[in-house]
Amino acid sequence: MTYDLTNRTAVVTGAASGIGAEIALVLARSGARVALLSRRADRLADLADKITAEGGQALAVAADVTGDLSGAVAAIHTAYGRVDLVVNNAGVMLANPITAGRADEWQRMIDTNITGVLNVTNAFTPDLTSTAAEGGTADLVNISSIGAHLTFPNFAVYTATKAAVTHLSANLRSEFGPLNVRVTNVEPGLTESELASHVDNAEVINELTTWFEAMGRLTAAEVADVVAYTTSRARHVNLRQIMVLPTTQI
Ligand code: NDP
């Protein structure tokens, strides 16, 4: 399904695969210009070609959300001008028991899932606030996870980073809402993507496979649809907190 996002300019992080790629597609199909931001330039170029072939507008911008984003921001501004819809979707899930002591994984998740969200938000805050001040619609969407509310073994740091995103979204909203910048926190449940492919623990991989078999999964496009829906509401309507799960996931 498409919505009306004509004349909107979006940035989607983690657009190389999974949920981010589908968000970029549906935003473009709904009329937005979309900057595709993640590290794998080849994947972004393929997606930009696909969007362009469909008649949409997309710009591939290879960048790491944990690093310096000034070049990426400049490239987006040169191509499209001011951004009014930011989707913080890039994330990594690395799962192991805490007793494995995988400080490398903890740091990567903290850097990508928390610092990355802050970096990207910071980079585009002037765009969002100035758009809103001039009467335009401005959106900040953070992709958190149902994991923000769950407790189970092997995912302690991942779920902690997602709890941080959920709490950050609620608090950002208290600053941005009065400025007329919408903040929407989306918490998906089990969803088809490449997310689990970075887990290097065979037992945890088996556990994840069992969950998917028992509880089903959403397609990435079904989560993307929620983002396009909420960002296309009238400017004063803010769906601030959305959990979207497979019906059979408990
Ligand atoms: P994917 O692994 O398919 O997508 C993650 C994306 O993030 C990739 O495109 C990757 O691209 C990008 N990325 C990772 N690290 C960085 C970085 N340092 N800088 C820029 N981009 C980065 O998984 P999903 O689509 O599932 O994940 C999207 C979001 O959804 C994540 O935040 C995840 O936590 C969340 N989520 C997913 C669920 C699921 O069941 N799939 C459930 C709940 C939440 P590249 O490698 O090119 O940089």
Image (cartoon, rainbow, N blue to C red):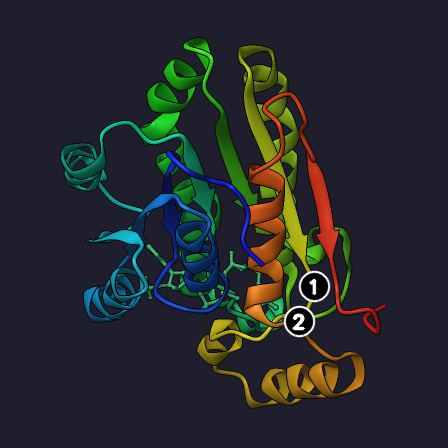
Residue 20 position in % (x across, y down): 45, 59
* 170 left or right, relative to 214: left
Identify the residue shown where x is 60% and y is 11%: 178
* 16 left or right, relative to 160: left
Mark toward the start of the polypeptide (1 vs 2): 1
**Image: 158 above or below 74:** below
Mark 2 closeness class: few <14, some 14–19, many ≥20 residues within 10 Å: many
Q: Quadrant of the C terminus?
A: bottom right
Q: Quadrant of residue 171?
A: top right
Q: Which mark is residue 199?
A: none
**SS at mark 2?**
loop
Identify the residue shown where x is 51% and y is 41%: 4
Residue 102 position in % (x across, y down): 48, 67
Q: Is mark 1 within 8 Å of ligand 1?
A: yes
Q: Specify the amino acid type for callout 2.
A: Leu
* Residue linked to disc 2: 218
Distance in Å between CA atoms under marks 1 and 2: 8 Å
Q: Is mark 2 within 8 Å of ligand 1?
A: yes
Kindly check if marks 1 and 2 are in contact, taking CB atoms under 8 A apart as contact.
yes
Q: Specify the amino acid type for callout 1.
A: Gly
Mark 1 closeness class: few <14, some 14–19, many ≥20 residues within 10 Å: many
Q: Which mark is residue 189?
A: 1
Identify the residue shown where x is 64% and y is 21%: 236
